[in-house]
Image: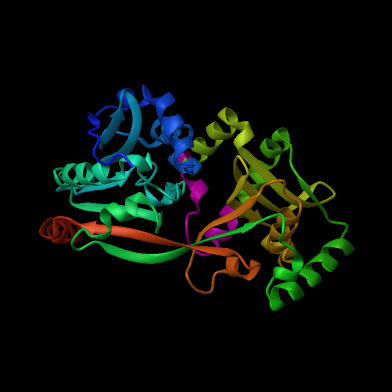
């Protein structure tokens, strides 16, 4: 440990300054074994799509002998409505809910040798930032971000779970009893219809992407919701990410005569397969459970080490039926200006 060392701290207030650190940022994220949602390849792309005139960067960087060892990339977004409520987020979160790209497991990147000094400096620095509300979604309970905010007065924590499993030892036997029965019925029904499971090539991902979008949108609109793909920014984000990082995406599907019944879209990070988006034909094939069957097939036929279902509810999540390892997550919120929030809600209601 190097707690006695003094780091050189630099506050970064522009995206250009932050992007200039991209090489060191990537090296630090690798040292921290950070999930891809905390890496520059994802977050710089996120800023290109969702940054606007209402956003202001507040990023603190710590250096040891000119080497980046701490990076805390926060920003504020001011509401365009009257009174302009100012919200604090980490980069990658805070875009409009209907366009949310679900950057999960946000964290401050940290070389553990400097944790004690970083904690003191960052807590003092954050206390000087003017904001009304702070939000962070799907934060790993053991993360440095959670440690920073856990003892802040009035912080609100809502529990959630990350569901993941190791691919190599997993088998059908690890499904719950009811899920095994569901798998046998689905497997038989799909086989009788001549269904084929397969991983898609890069060109096939683009070919069948509109089908994934249509499946997804139909399902959510039937629930009276817009669906993520209703927002052009969400669609553009993923289109550009697929084009710029083709080795970081994957898709599996189940087909009958080249017609998709279900499609799963994944983000691929080294040996981790993050289940990110899906859709299936609910109108014609829901009785065959093609979405569930596709998960089973994808796990059994994945070359990844970890199959990550990402965040789910703490109870009654379908993800639990796969006998996943569960990691504690928290959704954090902090109202820093209660009187402004009350006034904002009152004015917003009147208008």
Residue 63: give x, y in percent of width and height.
30, 29
Residue in front for this viewpoint, 29 or 288: 29
- Residue 281 on the magenta span: no
On the rendered structure, is 264 left or right of 55? Answer: right
Depth order, front residue of 189/275: 275
How was the colour assigned to the protein in this rendering? rainbow
Residues rendered magenta in the picture: 216-233
Quarter occupied by residue 290? bottom right
Q: How many marks?
A: 0
Residue placed at 31% from the left, 55% from the top?
A: 147
Image quadrant occupied by the N terminus: top left
**Quarter-of-image position of residue 20:** top left
- Residue 109 appearing in the image: no
Q: Is residue 15 left or right of residue 9?
A: right
Position of residue 317 measured from the top left corner of the image (x, y, whole percent): 54, 69
On screen, residue 267 above or below 282: above
Where is residue 59, by image quadrant? top left
């Amino acid at each position: 440990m190097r707690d006695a060392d003094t780091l050189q701290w630099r506050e970064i207030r522009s995206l250009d300054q932050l992007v200039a650190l991209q090489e060191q940022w990537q090296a630090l994220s690798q040292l921290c074994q950070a999930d891809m949602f905390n890496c520059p390849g994802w977050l710089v792309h996120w800023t290109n799509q969702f940054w606007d005139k209402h956003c202001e960067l507040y990023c603190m960087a710590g250096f040891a002998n000119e080497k980046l060892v701490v990076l805390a990339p926060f920003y504020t977004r001011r509401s365009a409505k009257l009174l302009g409520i100012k919200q604090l987020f980490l980069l990658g979160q805070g875009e409009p809910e209907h366009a949310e790209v679900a950057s999960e497991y946000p964290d401050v990147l940290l070389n553990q040798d400097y944790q004690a000094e970083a904690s003191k400096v960052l807590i003092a620095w954050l206390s000087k930032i003017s904001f009304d509300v702070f939000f962070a979604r799907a934060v790993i309970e053991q993360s440095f971000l959670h440690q920073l905010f856990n003892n802040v007065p009035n912080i609100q924590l809502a529990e959630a779970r990350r569901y993941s499993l190791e691919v190599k030892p997993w088998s059908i036997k690890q499904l719950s009893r009811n899920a095994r029965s569901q798998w046998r019925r689905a497997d038989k029904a799909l086989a009788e219809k001549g269904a084929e499971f397969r991983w898609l090539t890069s060109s096939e991902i683009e070919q069948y992407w509109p089908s994934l979008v249509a499946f997804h949108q139909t399902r959510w609109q039937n629930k009276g919701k817009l669906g993520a793909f209703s927002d052009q920014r969400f669609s553009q984000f993923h289109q550009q990410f697929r084009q710029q990082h083709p080795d970081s995406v994957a898709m599996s599907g189940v087909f009958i005569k080249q017609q998709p019944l279900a499609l799963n879209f994944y983000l691929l990070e080294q040996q981790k397969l993050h289940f990110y988006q899906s859709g299936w034909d609910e109108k014609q094939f829901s009785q065959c459970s093609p979405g569930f069957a596709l998960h089973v097939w994808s796990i059994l036929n994945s070359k990844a080490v970890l199959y990550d279902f990402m965040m789910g509810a703490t109870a009654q999540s379908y993800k639990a039926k796969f006998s996943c390892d569960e990691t504690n997550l928290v959704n954090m919120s902090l109202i820093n200006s209660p009187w402004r929030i009350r006034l904002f809600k009152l004015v917003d209601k009147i208008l």
